[in-house]
Image (spheres, helix red, strand yellow):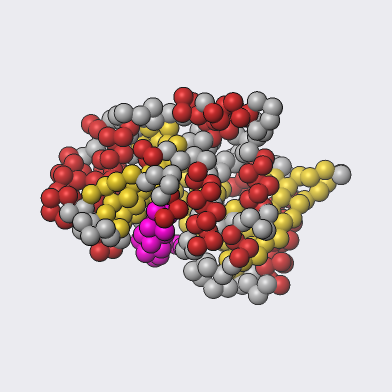
Amino acid sequence: MPPLRLERHLFLMRSQNPLFSHGDAQLFLAWRDGRVVGRISAQYDEHYDEPGTGMFGFLELEDAPDIVPGLLEAAASWLRAQGRSRMVGPMDFTMNDEVGVMLEGFERMPFVRQPWHPPYYAARCEEAGLEKAVDLLMYELVISDRSKILPVVFKLAERVQPRHGITIRRMSRRSLRRDLDRFAEVYNEAWSENWGFVPYGKRDLDVYAQEMQLVFDRNWYMVAETESGETAAVAITVPDINQVLVKMQGRVLPFGWLHYLRKKWIIDRVRVGFLGVKHAYQHTGVAAALYVEHFDTASRTPQKWGEMGWILESNKNMNRAMEAMGGRVVRRFRVYERVL
């Protein structure tokens, strides 16, 4: 699934990527006989919740046993020079970007912001001495099939407005940047105890808003609010632009833009990327209301199914919620670690 080349160039530019306002990175290539056979990044993020930890990412390599050790040592040496004592990854550049090495789901085309790797990647990483830090799960949901949802989800959803005065509204293009502040308010609280948490700041949201304009679909961007206007929960679900990018083959010109203009007729699946509830409202059933809203939306849009996640394997509440909606694990990614 070739990424859009222009987008990747912008992502790596120090003037464009918000990582460089609160961290730093170095990129490395592995060469053999005059050609590139591997790549890796080393980076640190002052917003990362574990001091002294650096990251590696953008891992790509040919299937040879001597490539990964050299790449990892290059990244580790740079991180040691930055005063880091531990390295985790891969992540491009943060936990809010593409994360992990694929362990399951090789037969499936990746969704937006999902990595894909051949099976030998995990074997080469473990041969090089990397140890498991955590696994991340992706669930498949057929969001047009209400029969797969446990009845208790509908009961909880029905009580949200009459009992707690919480209603769900859609974001708009005009309000998107302001609503992303609401998103960050929920995300920075609801995800704060998750492994590898990295908060969203103003600069991150400015860039995120620009990226979201390219894939924005009012049907799938939701805010749950109280009668006084306080944000209780947020859900951002992204129509899978990868279905368009695969036709563009990484290029806007000469004819890639035509596929982009036809995206609403091409995309039939979504990625549920963020669905979070503030701690004070987690007893209200607002999460159930957002789940049901997704199923109702699928009944009137071309997008009938999708994937939810990633979800930490240790997040028992979210994993139970996915099972309650008939979800099944279809991909697994592993984040590795090494003491420096």
Q: Which residues are magenta?
A: 179-197
Q: Is residue 213 covered in magenta?
A: no
x%, y% of residue 270?
Answer: 42, 36
The vertical placement of 51 against 153, above or below, is: below
Which residue occupies the extreme front position in the image? 174
Please tell me which residue lies in front, 286 or 146: 286
x%, y% of residue 188?
Answer: 41, 63
Horizontal side, residue 338 vs residue 138: left or right: right
Horizontal side, residue 140 vs residue 28: left or right: left
Residue 88 in view (yes/no): yes
x 21%, y 56%: residue: 227
The vertical placement of 112 against 162, above or below, is: above
x%, y% of residue 127?
Answer: 64, 53
Q: Is residue 193 covered in magenta?
A: yes
x 49%, y 63%: residue: 201
x 45%, y 53%: residue: 177
Quarter occupied by the C terminus: bottom right
Horizontal side, residue 268 vs residue 59: left or right: left
Image-quadrant location for residue 140 = top left
Quarter occupied by the N terminus: top right
